[in-house]
Amino acid sequence: MTFTRSSPLNRVANAHPSPYPGPSRRVVHRRRLAPAGIWFDSQARRLSLTNGFRARGGAVRDRGRPTIHDVARAAGVSHQTVSNVLNGTGRVGMATRARVDAAIAELGYHPHAGAASLRTRRSGRLAYPIGAGDLGPLNTIMLEFVEALTSAAGRHHHHLVLAAGGPAGMDDVQRLLRSGAADAVVLANVAPRDERVAALAQRGVPFACFGRTEADLPQCWIDVDSRAGLREVTEYLVGLGHERVAFLGYTPQGRWDLDREAGYRDAMTAAGLAARVRTAEPDPPRVRQVIEALLESPPTAIVTGSDVLAGAVYAAAAQRGLRIGSDLAVTGFDGSMVGRLLTPALTTLAMPVGYIADRLVTRVLAEIDGPTGAPGELVRAELVLGASG
């Protein structure tokens, strides 16, 4: 491209001479990167910003709402990279993400709610709020659940979008919904009178829960019958001849912990045996203390509320020279990777996480078309017999 002395770009160069040595007529080439008035100075290596299009002669005219392509050109990336940053998908480096975020802020870009799908007005994404302990190294069953939920969403041609968890994290969920980045919400670890459930129901947001909701709220939930499961495994141990059967669980973190202890008590009461319950906070040092105290006068069997607790009993028993299976029977709950790695093989109650995930996705997609009024669904955990009891 050739510039004359009277061209707009030459006038810019004369008004702002280059700091670099060279001929006096050296032109500072300013290349337009975006219709939103973003110009790149090839000599000073900087962006110049205006509030609109730059027309011929350097004039600036107003423009409409910025698009994803404007952001892409401003950041020097593809529009797909911008989409990945907005949706939290794909692999985007920190430096690239920072450039995209800066361009979004500078242009005042906001995704159009219907841009993801003009035909269906849906994004094809489901929001899943992650709680503080969901991705902890010991909570392997929730890691497996998230994997199953992601796969289930994929089978239904949807994607799972992770969001901040807890009541405060509902703001993050609402932003996803308002921007059109998600069509519905899947919740897990639902507590009694869960504020998240009430907030979604009040706003008419389609959702499905892994965990029961109260009778006055939508019943779009799937849950495991923990009480029936613990009753079954306790009855199994009693049937083997154990009379001194103890229960080890967590200090209640949710309805499931209460139900598991209740199932154990149901079986012990029905058998006319004395219950021996011990609970601990989900903190490894505290769990070890409680197990050590329990083994001072060891029962013949310990029913635990999770495979992680069963693993802790294995370790404590080994230190005392107790053999799992012959000296001390131990059972778990979850059917998680932790339990599958124990030796001897752990007798446990396995939750059907794959089935639960698929039912949650099926149900929440049905809710998008309007409230179905369908009842909640209670599923049984499968008793998987190992060599531990």
Image: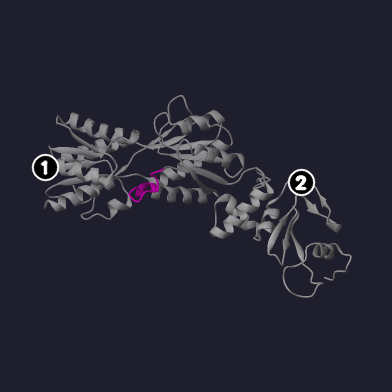
Q: Residue 155 bears which disc, if any?
A: none
> Would you say 228 lies left or right of 4 here?
left
Q: Which residue is mark 1?
A: 296
- Pick whichever, 179 or 95, lies toward us: 95
Residue at x 14% of width, y 47% of height:
328
Question: What type is the residue that disc 1 sits on?
Answer: Glu
Q: Which residues are magenta?
A: 132-142
Q: Quadrant of the rendered structure where residue 250 is?
A: top left
Q: Split into 4 quadrants, where in the image is the N terminus? A: bottom right
Q: Position of residue 54 (x, y in %)?
A: 80, 55
Query: Is residue 384 at all visible to an observer of this figure?
Result: no
The secondary structure type at the circle numbered 1 is loop
Q: Which residue is mark 2?
A: 64
Q: CA distance from mark 1 to mark 2?
A: 75 Å
- As for residue 67 lying within the magenta part, the answer is no
| Residue 139 among those drawn in magenta | yes
| Res. 3 visible in picture | yes
Of the two numbered discs 1 and 2 on the same chain, state the one appearing first in sequence.
2
- At a point 59% along the width and 45% down the height, the residue shown is 181
